Amino acid sequence: MHSFKLTRRLFLLLATLALALPAVAQVPSLLNYDGPDRSQKLLAAANSEGTLTVYTAFRPQDMQAVFGPFEKKYGIKIKSWRSGKSNVLQRTLNEASGNRHAVDAILIPSTELEMLRREKILQPVKSPYQKGLIAGALPAHAEWVTVMLNVVVQAYNTNLIKKEELPKTYQDLLDPKWKGKLGIEADIDEWYSTIVSDMGEEKGTKFFNTLMERNGMSVRLGMSLLTNLVVAGEVPMTLTTYIDLPEKAKQKGSPIDWFSLEPVVAQGFNMGIARRAPHPNAALLFYDYMLSSDTQKLLKSLYYYPANASVQPALTGLRIKIVDPVYTVDNAVKLTKAFEDVVSKRAR
């Protein structure tokens, strides 16, 4: 069963049951303090806590590169639990409903974090590092913030497909030469709905129907898996992968490269601090760290799209559309069914 479907069903079940979290006294914190001595007070409070626990779906190969400098700089240990986004969502909800409050910060894609917000898992945060973020990175409720964007691009096996043969538009994919050569991520409802919406719902749905009828697509679960299948030549081209995956594989000498069809779809990778965080000040210090210009530059070097508007992204001049997590959650059933009916159920 696809992780996206699990996520949606879990959220709908919880909504039906009207999950009520037990009232627990808030641990004193500086999450909404903005006095002139904030930095000194926060550093002292975070050091007194000494540790924080992060639940995340961050790329495992990049976690140490991003989390390590925080530990080295502040001497605060990060206890991380890493899994897929649906597993992080489910564990966080299960612990909250069982009155177990172990997690301090959650770092996962925007849709799943919006689901946690609606279950009152997160709390508002005030930080000077929230200034200068890209549009949409910080909603009015301030219970989550975008720390970077996962940019979805297309990738191809360079031994099987020549660069000059690549499609320039989505319509070019209808050429019969792509029959049996295309792959797509199974958990990609947000990307699909964004592309369809950009084309116009009727026209976009017709395009994907025609593409499936004419050339078909291989549906696989996992961006990393799809990228590896492209490298192996089993899937000559994928329509969906995160830009950092083929770029890093290419740098290691693998026969893969990426390109982009517009609009380029990106999804926020967001952070929130748990309402019952046992180490709220260490979590807040980590929050500041993730939004700082140094960390944003580090994320850029790893081929993520920074949320800090002052850090120039590697991708420039492209028409990027960012997935709206509020719309996605509000229309979860509709989006899942549309993708399944047009693509998943008809995959080869």
Image (cartoon, rainbow, N blue to C red):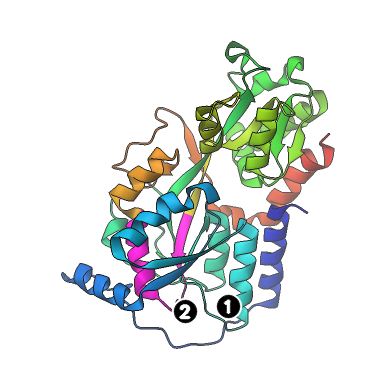
In percent of width and height, residue 181 lies at 74, 24
Q: Assess whether mark 2 and mark 1 are in contact (beta carbons under 8 angstroms).
A: yes
Alpha carbon distance from label 1 to label 2: 9 Å
Establish if 259 lies above or below 50: above
- Occupied quadrant, residue 155: top right
Amino acid carrying mark 1 in the image: Ala
Establish if 274 lies above or below 328: below
Indicate yes or no whether the magenta region holds residue 287: yes
Residue 154 in sight in this render = yes
- Occupied quadrant, residue 18: bottom right
Determine which of the numbered discs, if any, sits on residue 96 in the image.
1
Indicate yes or no whether the magenta region holds residue 177: no
Label 2 crowd (10 A; few <14 / some 14-19 / many >=20)? many
User: Which residues fall within the magenta stretch?
Assistant: 270-290
The residue located at (49%, 49%) in the rendering is 268
Q: Nearer the viewer, residue 102 or 35?
A: 102
Establish if 29 lies above or below 167: below
- Occupied quadrant, residue 174: top right
Determine which of the numbered discs, if any, sits on residue 66 in the image.
none
Establish if 160 lies above or below 7: above
Question: Circle 2 sits on which residue?
Answer: 276
Which is more N-terminal, label 2 or label 1?
A: 1
Q: Secondary structure at mark 1?
A: helix
In percent of width and height, residue 345 lies at 83, 42
Q: Nearer the viewer, residue 319 or 2?
A: 2
In percent of width and height, residue 49 lies at 35, 77
**In the picture provided, is 138 more to the left or to the right than 113?**
left
Residue 125 in sight in this render = no
